[in-house]
Amino acid sequence: MRKEILQVTGLDKSFGGLHATRNLDFELFEGDLNAIIGPNGAGKSTFFNLLTGYHRPDSGTILFDGVDITNRPPHEITRIGISRAFQVSNIFTKMTVFENVRSAVQAQMGMAFNLFGNAAKVGNDRTEHLLSLCGLSDKSTHIAGALSQGDKKKLELTLALAGKPKLLLLDEPTAGMSLEETRETMGLVDRLNEKYNLTILFTEHNLSVVFNHARNITLLHHGEIIIQGTPDQVRSNETAQNIYFGEHH
Amino acid sequence: MPVETKPVALSDEGEKSTHLAAPHARVGLSGPVIAVLALFSLVVPLLPGEYPTIVGVEILILSLFAGSFNLIYGYMGQMSFGQGAFFGLGAYATALLCRWCQAGSTDIGYPQFFLALLLAIPVSALGALVVGFFLVRLTGIYFSILSLAFGELLFYIVFSWYGFTGGDDGIQGIYPPALLRDPHYYYYFTLAIVAAATFLIWRITRSPFGFTLRMLRDNQRRTAFVGVNIRRAMLLNFVLAGTFAGIAGALWGPFQRSVSPSLLGWMQSGTPVFMTLMGGADFFAGPLVGSLIYTSLNAYVTRFTVFWPLTIGTIILIIVLFFPGGILSIIDGRLARNRGSRGA
Amino acid sequence: MPSDVSSFLIQLFSGLSRAMMLFLVASGLSLIFGVMNILNFAHASLWLLGGYITFTLYQVFSSVFGQNGFLLIPAILLGTAFMFALGWLIERVLIRRMYARELPEQLLLTFAMILIIGDLIKLVWGVQNRRIFLPIEPIEAFGGFINPYLFIVIGCGFGIAAALWFFLHRTRYGKIVRAAVHSREMVSALGIRITAIYAGVYAMGVAIAAFSAGVFLPIMPIGLGLDMDLIIQCFAVVVIGGFGSILGTFVASLIVGIVYSFSVLIWPGGALAVIFLILVTVLIFRPWGLFGTEMRY
């Protein structure tokens, strides 16, 4: 029996009377590589925002690795072990790629408030390891803001990994990427999952990516779960085809 | 020192490579120039007349003031228009204790004087803690507005609290002890304190916390999402900056023999902003170079005209419009071009 | 002796008139920020300059046509027109270059303008305060005496507020300006030169401020340093009301103006502190202002 890592119960959030998520129950087990899909406005982003403390839920609880993280702020949740890569990359634009990752590594080491250490001497090995893992080693001295879109998204993922997450949330990890970059990124996602047994949950518009990589898919619509199952189950579900795939064909 | 082999853009590496080092990672002055400046700072009191020494003390004090401001602006990316408040708080703390120790006379002992200077640290830190508590909830334009507003509030408190602060008359007749009354000695005294404080700031900017500040400058959301409590980090930096400003203020009163509410006012708060902008906020040495130019210019211009704000306003306008990176970035850019043309 | 009720009413009217001035200056500040995303630190300095120019125009008119209080009307109109032109010029020459810059540089440019305008005023008009004395007798009202000019001021304030609302919501040009707040692309797509909008909005904001300075000359002397006091109160207004919301600016002006007016009565030195208390309270519980929209980092 695999260990349950995330347990969401009755999660409710509405904005101005509109339900973004409605009485949502959701769980993840260690080593999962699952996806959440749904049309625009289905509540995917809100769900991620609730999981990471960016929004506070109106009701419901979020248990992560045995800890109640409901209502905790983002920085605490990050330290507890949920990292997030955003759809639009949030990187440190004026620093070099290396400094980006090293600063995140030092934050993970709990050194963010260390006043008199020498930043250049701490966390370099792990930074280099992360950069080579994500294929950014040759860009380490580049200014992050000047990177290509694809490289910015890679760096975004690297920064998320620097937090030593137990659960990695990826928001549209391949949005705006070329076919080649998409293949590369999803290859890395698979590798992180298989080699490091990292639990990953991602949202994605590109359905072939979803069906090729996710083991379990959750379809959200109007903030509610419509169906949850393997790619084949979701593909063959009639309701799913109507509300989601119908819009795309 | 061992040579850094990691591909990290450190200042020294940054000086050599043209486009790879991150902005704000550089000193802005090359080693030889620093050496010449340091040497020059040692011989200023030997120049003929007292005037260069007096201006020198002001340059030193204000460069620490500007350096404190740049922790907030250049490193953390927020524009504070209220840094004068903490300069003033430090100045008043020292002045009030000095006056109490002098007890009507013009004499003060060394221990009492040093204690009065030290008092500026907790007072300005506490002031920055209270103001910062509110301020760090905001960023960008809101941060700037509220910093200006808080600065003016503290100004009005000092301005109207006659019984304690002397109101708009300020406090007159504050004297440093025996030897330090000679501007030449006071110069070396100030040089030592400012150098030590500047070294501390330098260490902070190179520390992991220094990089936390750069993270805050570049992307607050990501900073929170790598696990940093961003409000706490901003508050700590604000208190540090306020404390350094307070130390600068503490040195000011005994040198001028008086303090007045204008030390907390918006014009005083504008001073480090202008200096930093002139020198170049992207460089550690920017505030120092800015203070050197601004204060020298001030000392010279005010001999001829009372219209100093007009002069400095016009200079700022020209710098913002045409040289937005400040003087050091002009020099830096030229160096980079030269290296480029040599194919380095 | 005036009764408590009458002193209350008189204080209320003085507060209302103060609120009108705050609104007229802060609405321009808010509009300029909403449309161009520029915080015009020098807004109150331009207000002050407008006041001095109106003062001088009134002096000139009086010396040519003889003393007559009604000469204030052409003086205000001409002063407002002049400041409109000056505002246009400043936008074209200075502000325009800052749109693509980062916030701190934008702040610095307008901060430098404060210094320059302040010193220019000192150069031309010297350091003494200026005011216009109108031969108006206080009238007896509410069991006390009150300067009837206050009602003119309040009327002007409401008039301009209504005109501004009408302009923004009912005229084609105004609708374009409001559209510019939300999307520059949209305005460009309409085939309108966005540059003309920017210059127009800046000039209009400055002109409204100058107008209010002129209207206030008979009841409030102007002098150096007033611009800093006013800009800080205007910032308080705009933050309390919420940036970009004209309605919010209006409500916040009323709050700040009236609260200020009554606190001065009770605790002269602490009026500003009371406004700060409101400002800080709003910032803690609603950092985006009473009428603004929430944003998170």
Image (spheres, coloured by chain):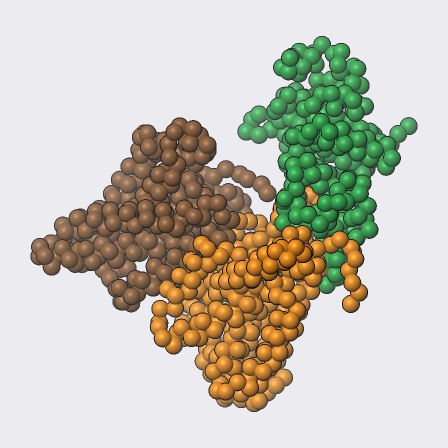
Quick check: B302 left or right of B233?
left
Pick the front one: C9 or A248: A248
Residue B186 vs B248, above or below: the answer is below
**Position of residue A126 measured from the top left corner of the image (x, y, whole percent):** 81, 48
> What colour denotes chain A?
green
In the image, the chain rendered in orange is B
Quadrant the N terminus of chain A occupies: top right
In the image, the chain rendered in brown is C
Residue B171 vs C204, above or below: the answer is below
On the image, which quarter does residue B337 sit in? bottom right
On the image, which quarter does residue A46 sit in? top right
Residue drawn 36% across the image and 75% down it: B304
Residue drawn 66% across the image and 33% down it: A87
**Position of residue B188 measured from the top left corner of the image (x, y, whole percent):** 60, 82
| Residue sitting at the far top | A238
| Residue sitting at the far front | B342
Residue A140, visible in the rendered structure? yes
On the image, which quarter does residue C155 sit in? top left
Pick the front one: A191 or B224: A191
Quick check: C137 left or right of A2?
left
**Position of residue A139 measured from the top left corner of the image (x, y, whole percent):** 72, 45
Quick check: A225 left or right of C127?
right
Residue B227, visible in the rendered structure? no
Quick check: C246 left or right of A111?
left
